[in-house]
Image: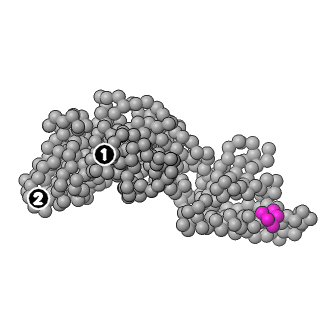
Amino acid sequence: MAHVFNVVIGTATITMGDTLMAFTPKAPADDSGRMADSFTAYITQATINSLQRALDRARAWDSNRTGDAVYINFQPGSTGTTWRSRVYDGRISLTKNALGSDWANAQFETIVAVERDPFWEGAETTLAATNTSGTSTAGLTVINSEDEAVTGNDFYATIAENAVSGDLPTPAMIYYKNTTNDVKGVSALCIGHFAEGAGLETPPIQGILQQGSGTTDGSSSGGSYVAVVWATGAETSLTTWSGAFARLYQHNYKVIARFSEAFAYTDLYLKAKLLYGSAVLGETRWQLADANKEMQVIGSMKILPYSNDLMDYGGITLALYGKMASGSGTAKLDYVALIPQDSYRALSPVTGAAYNETIVDDPVAGQLYTIISGNFKRPTHIVEEGEPIMLAPQRKNTLYFLHDTTDGEMEIARTGTVVIKYRPRVRTI
């Protein structure tokens, strides 16, 4: 069976068919940047003109990321699988035999040289995502906290080992729908990611979510918060936790705190430290807290900073510190979440996503938008920090979601549904 080889621009297709004379997909020298490739075909002047316009379109897309991208689509023989690689530039030239045997049919032997991605993408696929609420491809429910004692109270979505095919990490296309029926919109949305590896299991919840305790409160995760107090403007240890830190496996984590009530302080700085006794193993930078917001993104650090064989982890604590220019204060700390940063994405609001609206983060197409009533699209968020969430092939992937609302709150019972799609990537076919 013949190969299928096309150049695709949006919904338009330039079909090469039997005119394709030679094409052997090259393997990239590495997995970064772009690569050169080429194919040879007997084509008419009309097809040459179409290909020239396609290459113009590819250069325009590369320049401004608008309109349709250009792809080479290739199905080797009878495999039944079509792969694509995005084209960014190229040129067309005639061979020395251009006026050879097929001249009578007004077809010219032509070489098309292209600059393309150093990989091939397969068909878009929706992944089954799982937590204790179940497994879904239509929308898995996540909430704004974590309670292992209550089925369905999860802020994560797990993708099973071997669900992601291919041999390269590939961007997750994330659809996050606001399913809380009130007037508040989804404001900042933070997405973390952990990919299991050889001997590295997904961190336990008790390791990545540190609960506050001391004051009973039904609106706090775990049913209580800790009242943190500082009496001077000097650096003050606000609270500490001892947790299952050994199983965090020397990965980077984003430290995100939820306060049961927002505070009005405009000069409060927060920092997290990892301690072994009194020795500081790692710490974030000082972060100026956002006044009138319950969600505080503090910073990143590696946990643990040393090899698992070098120390007894029983003495390790996580500590939250605060300082102000002057004066005293108090705040109600619900929990601190250590969000894995194998990849990490933070979206900040332009307007926020209202009830039943869906934020779509599609790095494959280079688009970030929200689906609103009537299936229209509008920009409600921008990327504040991070690159796309990169799913690891043939490994268990877990994504974590936390958000606050357009009024600065971060209620633990707020829900969303998550759909995760991807295209498998391979180096060569």
Identify the magenta region: 43-47
Secondary structure mainly formed by the magenta segment? helix
Mark toward the start of the polypeptide (1 vs 2): 2
Marks 1 & 2, CB-CB < 8 Å contact: no
Magenta stretch holds residue 293: no
Name which residue lies at 52% across and 44% down: 421
Q: In the rendered image, is residue 203 in sight?
A: no
Q: Nearer the viewer, residue 293 or 384?
A: 293
Q: Is residue 148 left or right of residue 1?
A: left
Is residue 226 visible in the rendered structure shown here?
yes
Give the numbered dot on residue 34. none
Q: Between 29 and 165, which is closer to the camera in this rendering?
A: 165
**Foreground: 332 or 392?**
332
Determine whether the residue tagged by mark 2 lies in a helix, strand or loop: loop
* Residue at 57% across, 47% down: 423
Q: Which kind of residue does numbered mark 1 sit on?
A: Leu
> Where does residue 70 sit, x and y in percent of width and height?
64, 59
Which circle marks residue 338 in the picture? 1
Crowding at mark 2 (Cα within 10 Å: few <14, some 14-19, many 20+) = some
* Percent position of residue 170, x then y: 52, 49
Q: Going by the image, does 49 lie left or right of 346?
A: right
Please provide percent x and percent y for residue 140. Answer: 44, 36
- What residue is drawn where x is 39% and y is 40%? 179
Residue type, mark 2 in image: Ala
Q: Position of residue 51 (x, y in %)?
A: 72, 64
Q: Where on the picture, by quarter, is residue 183?
A: top left
Helix, strand or loop at disc 1? Answer: strand
Which quadrant of the view contains residue 151?
top left
Q: Which mark is residue 234?
A: 2
Number of labelled discs?
A: 2
Q: Is residue 219 above or below residue 318?
A: above
